[in-house]
Image (tube, rainbow, N blue to C red):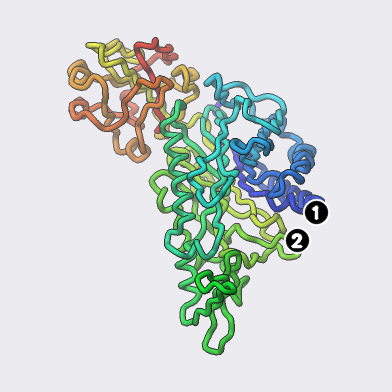
């Protein structure tokens, strides 16, 4: 029986401020969150929280249990019988504490769901409810790390980091990554340059994370990266725009004419239009200019994603800045006058992950990317969510046999019906979809994954011309999806990457995306065996 696409809801929420007034705010926040669950009816929910326990976590961490109970005992989540919760609460370990909290809820109608065990390098069944809290360093079904401290030189101690889980839902595999990047500490520093020093530090940290996922022992998998990126609009350019035609009047610290404490911008009638301080950003029409038309004029200054356009994808933003909102329930729609409003909270994804999402323009299944609680006080950050449909069994499988250079001839191709020799075996599904693999450690794939597959091998001359590296030449359809071919096998001595050998190009080794004529080249679906140490094998994701 063909499987349907899965309605999935990804939510990111910096919840730090709701723990400042837990008696009031926890109930308001969870009520709004649960009402959206009831409206959107997802079958898989991923809620990524940052600053769990609040800024004064020593006093307010005790309220986290109540927050979890409000969710777990709700009527809206009653039919979600498979749950995983990861709460990094051990603030006594400064070198590891991130204050991240990741919640995953799986509806009872979803039966083909697996979660990755990072210690065993294998998927394991997902059953029942597990809540991991306190110190979660030894929990095997997640990966967690803090960013190196030198990425944030202005901060003596930071909780910024990421928490990753890997999932297989109806045969489609992807990573879900909770992330928290560093904020802007001073408006004055932020406006000194464009991009600001804070933006540069965030860029370094995010680049570090992406490179880590491309080079660690796990194979690169399609991923969804959502959290509090703290992306800000370019403060220098925004202030320049808002202060056009105005006169700047700085105020200096008493007995120190070099330390500016405040700058006000006045019009020709000496009326204050804009006021700036280290933690002050106040315009005379503050709410109007940032709330009207969802702050559309400000989008041109939202540039931090541009540096990652080749690595990450984001659906069009049609909602107002997610930060900083008033923390008082009477000011649900109002921005605090402390920072320039910005789209700090985002749902991003790798380009390969984008291909896992069903095309809503053709299916009629509406995709939503928006703020949560637009009319409700949910703290200084409004949660941001993406509702989408994930395709089942979406992908192509690419298996590469790589022997050491000491071998004079290539190993036999296990997938080739003709039994010929070749260094490369490609098993690609007939569907024009991105690659997804079900087992990274042993190069195994469920039988259905290799059904209707085909195999192409490199010839002996091509092997001899370049025994250690090979280049894959994709068809036009495959090339559109191909961002990188690289091996990330657990063996540290394996060293090959992409685009090297022109001799291979002459052999025309193609990755056909929908070549039905070649479907019967490998008529018998099979599991590729685990390869002995002298013959390394790896699967690479498009």
The reply to whether residue 454 is visible in this rendering is no
The reply to whether residue 485 is visible in this rendering is yes
Residue 213 picture quarter: top left
Secondary structure of the residue carrying tag 2 is helix
Q: 515 or 347: nearer the eye? A: 347
Which of the two labelled residues, at mark 2 and mark 1, occupies the earlier sequence position? 1
Rendered view: 280 above or below 495 = below
What residue is pinned by disc 2? 329
Question: Residue 398's mark?
Answer: none
Q: Is residue 164 left or right of residue 402?
A: right
Residue at x 44% of width, y 29% of height: 216
Residue at x 75% of width, y 65% of height: 330
Quadrant of the snapshot with the N terminus? top right
The x and y percentages for residue 480 are 35, 40
Residue at x 17% of width, y 18% of height: 461
Rendered view: 533 above or below 55 = above
Rendered view: 147 above or below 262 = above
Q: Residues within 10 Å of mark 2 (few under 14, many from 20)?
A: some
The x and y percentages for residue 541 are 41, 30
Determine the residue located farthest toward the right in the rendered image: 23
Quadrant of the snapshot with the C terminus? top left
The x and y percentages for residue 287 are 63, 71
Q: Residues within 10 Å of mark 1 (few under 14, many from 20)?
A: few
The x and y percentages for residue 328 are 74, 62
Determine the residue located farthest toward the front in the rendered image: 255
Residue 433 picture quarter: top left
Q: 59 or 512: nearer the eye? A: 59
What residue is pinned by disc 1? 24
Secondary structure of the residue carrying tag 1 is helix
Mark 2 and mark 1 residues within 8 Å of each other at the beta carbon: yes
Residue at x 62% of width, y 22% of height: 125
């Amino acid at each position: 029986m063909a499987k349907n696409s899965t309605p999935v809801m990804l939510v990111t929420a910096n919840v730090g401020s709701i723990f400042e007034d837990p008696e009031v705010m926890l109930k308001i926040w969870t009520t709004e969150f649960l009402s959206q669950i009831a409206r959107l009816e997802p079958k898989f929910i991923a809620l990524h929280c940052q600053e769990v326990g609040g800024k004064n976590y020593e006093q307010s961490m005790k309220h986290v249990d109540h927050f979890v109970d409000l969710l777990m005992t709700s009527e809206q989540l009653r039919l979600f019988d498979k749950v995983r919760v990861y709460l990094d609460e051990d603030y006594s370990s400064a070198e590891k504490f991130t204050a991240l909290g990741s919640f995953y809820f799986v509806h009872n109608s979803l039966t083909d769901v697996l979660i990755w065990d990072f210690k065993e390098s294998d998927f394991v069944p997902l059953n029942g409810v597990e809540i991991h809290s306190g110190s979660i360093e030894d929990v095997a079904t997640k990966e967690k790390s803090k960013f190196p401290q030198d990425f944030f030189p202005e901060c003596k101690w930071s909780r910024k980091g990421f928490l990753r889980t890997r999932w297989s839902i109806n045969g489609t595999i992807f990573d879900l990554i909770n992330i928290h990047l560093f904020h802007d500490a001073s408006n004055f520093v932020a406006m000194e340059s464009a991009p600001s020093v804070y933006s540069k530090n965030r860029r370094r940290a995010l680049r570090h994370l992406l490179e880590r996922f491309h080079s660690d022992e796990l194979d690169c998998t399609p991923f969804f990266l959502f959290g509090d990126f703290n992306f800000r609009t370019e403060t220098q350019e925004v202030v320049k725009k808002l202060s056009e035609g105005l006169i700047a009047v700085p105020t200096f610290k008493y007995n120190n004419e070099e330390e500016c404490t405040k700058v006000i911008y006045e019009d020709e009638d000496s009326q204050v239009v804009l006021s700036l301080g280290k933690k002050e950003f106040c315009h005379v029409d503050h709410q109007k200019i940032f709330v009207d038309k969802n702050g559309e004029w400000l989008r041109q200054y939202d540039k931090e994603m541009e540096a990652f356009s080749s690595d990450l994808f984001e659906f069009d933003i049609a909602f107002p800045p997610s930060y900083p909102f008033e923390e008082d329930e009477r000011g649900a729609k109002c921005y605090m006058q402390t920072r320039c409003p910005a789209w700090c909270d985002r749902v991003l994804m790798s380009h390969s992950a984008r291909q896992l999402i069903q095309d809503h323009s053709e299916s009629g299944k509406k995709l939503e990317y928006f703020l949560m609680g637009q009319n409700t006080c949910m703290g200084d950050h409004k949660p941001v969510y993406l509702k989408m449909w994930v395709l089942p069994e979406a992908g192509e499988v690419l298996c590469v046999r790589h022997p050491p250079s000491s071998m004079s001839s290539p190993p036999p191709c296990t997938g080739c019906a003709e039994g010929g020799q070749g260094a490369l075996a490609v098993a690609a599904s007939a569907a024009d979809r991105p690659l997804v693999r079900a087992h990274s450690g042993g190069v195994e794939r469920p039988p259905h994954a290799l059904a209707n597959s085909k195999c192409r091998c490199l010839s002996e001359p091509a092997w001899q011309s370049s025994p250690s590296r090979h280049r894959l030449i994709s068809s036009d359809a495959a090339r559109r999806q191909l961002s990188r071919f690289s091996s990330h096998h657990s063996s540290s001595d394996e060293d090959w990457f992409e685009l090297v050998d022109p001799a291979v190009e002459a052999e025309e080794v193609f990755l056909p995306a929908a070549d039905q004529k070649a479907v019967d080249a490998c008529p018998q679906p099979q599991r590729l065996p685990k390869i002995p140490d002298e013959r390394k094998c790896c699967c690479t994701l498009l």
